[in-house]
Image: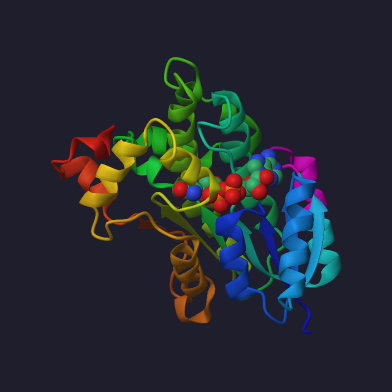
Amino acid sequence: MNNEVVVLFGAGAIGEAIVRRVSAGRKLLLADYSEDKLAEMKQKLSEAGFSVETIKADLSSRTSIKEVVAKAQSLGDIMGLVNAAGVSPSQASAEQVLKVDLYGTSVLLEEFGKVMAAGGSGIVISSQSGHRLPGLSVEDNKSLAMTPTEELLDLPILQEDVITDSLAAYQYAKRTNVLRVAAESVNWQKRGARINAISPGIIMTPLALDELNGPRGDGYRKMFDSMVTKRPGTPDEIASLAELLMDRRSAFITGSDFLADGGITAQYWYGDVDEVRN
Ligand SMILES: NC(=O)c1ccc[n+]([C@@H]2O[C@H](COP(=O)([O-])OP(=O)(O)OC[C@H]3O[C@@H](n4cnc5c(N)ncnc54)[C@H](O)[C@@H]3O)[C@@H](O)[C@H]2O)c1
């Protein structure tokens, strides 16, 4: 065992697939607000040969994120950070989505940007949803990217006339993730560390399965039929990309966002299958 630490925020399906690729022989610190999920993943990964520690933590709280940072530092050199924690529009109110996915991710980028080891790298899981927003003005892009984190949620563009529901909140949160990854990568560069975003399309997880078995299932199936894959993605396909981005082979890549969605965003803007836009 070496002295290298990988931190995963969000003990869910996508996060698990990624850390399985990048944590062998390192210490893996899992952070999630669900103690059940932490215990379940710790058992699964320990039985698979990983060295796992856990900490109960809330992505929407700076205090909590700082506790995760302190625990990670006590374990060794922080070489990897994966943020796969988040709430979806069907799980939470607009306010909660902004607090967790937008504000929380911004704090995480800021706090880990102060402690990453040289040569370290991070991944933020954003979403194709952020790519469904039209282009924003240069001023709005800059304010979402650069406003001090504690003032972010007071920006006019994040108030009720724009954020009309939890889907709008999710889209703005995910667009902001990508902008803040680019802006924070400047600070990470000073430490010799890299940070990138991945924007997945629909990935098969228990949540996606619920959607497929629900009232919108037929629409989803038509959408899948139109895709290059004829199916949704798997957590492993996102992990393949994350593994490459966190590896030294990607030493020249930072501050970027990678859309991995089976072609659905291109179809949303330029295609002829209505279900893709519904
Ligand atoms: N599954 C998809 O189709 C899909 C597509 C695009 C983007 N994403 C994004 O990928 C990320 C991971 O999603 P997933 O599909 O693996 O979902 P998941 O529900 O399996 O994992 C999310 C995890 O985040 C944790 N979490 C939620 N809020 C938290 C908080 N405040 N503090 C700490 N932990 C918290 C949950 O307990 C859960 O373990 C999310 O950001 C999601 O928006 C998912």
The answer to whether residue 221 is seen in the rendering is yes
- Residue at the spot 75% in from the left edge and 57% down from the top edge: 40
In the picture, the quarter occupied by the C terminus is top left
**In the foreground, 127 or 193:** 127
Task: Determine the residue located farthest toward the bottom in the rendered image.
Answer: 1
In the picture, the quarter occupied by the N terminus is bottom right
- Residue at the spot 42% in from the left edge and 53% down from the top edge: 200
Instruction: Tell me the quarter of the picture where residue 102 sits.
Output: top right
Residue 6, x across and y down, in percent: 69, 68
Q: Please, what is the dominant secondary structure of the magenta stretch? A: helix
Residue stretch in magenta: 58-68
Please indicate whether residue 157 sits to the left or right of residue 246 in the image. Answer: left
Task: Determine the residue located farthest toward the left in the rendered image.
Answer: 272
Residue 123, x across and y down, in percent: 54, 60
Q: Is residue 59 magenta?
A: yes
The answer to whether residue 107 is seen in the rendering is no
Please indicate whether residue 240 sits to the left or right of residue 103 in the image. Answer: left
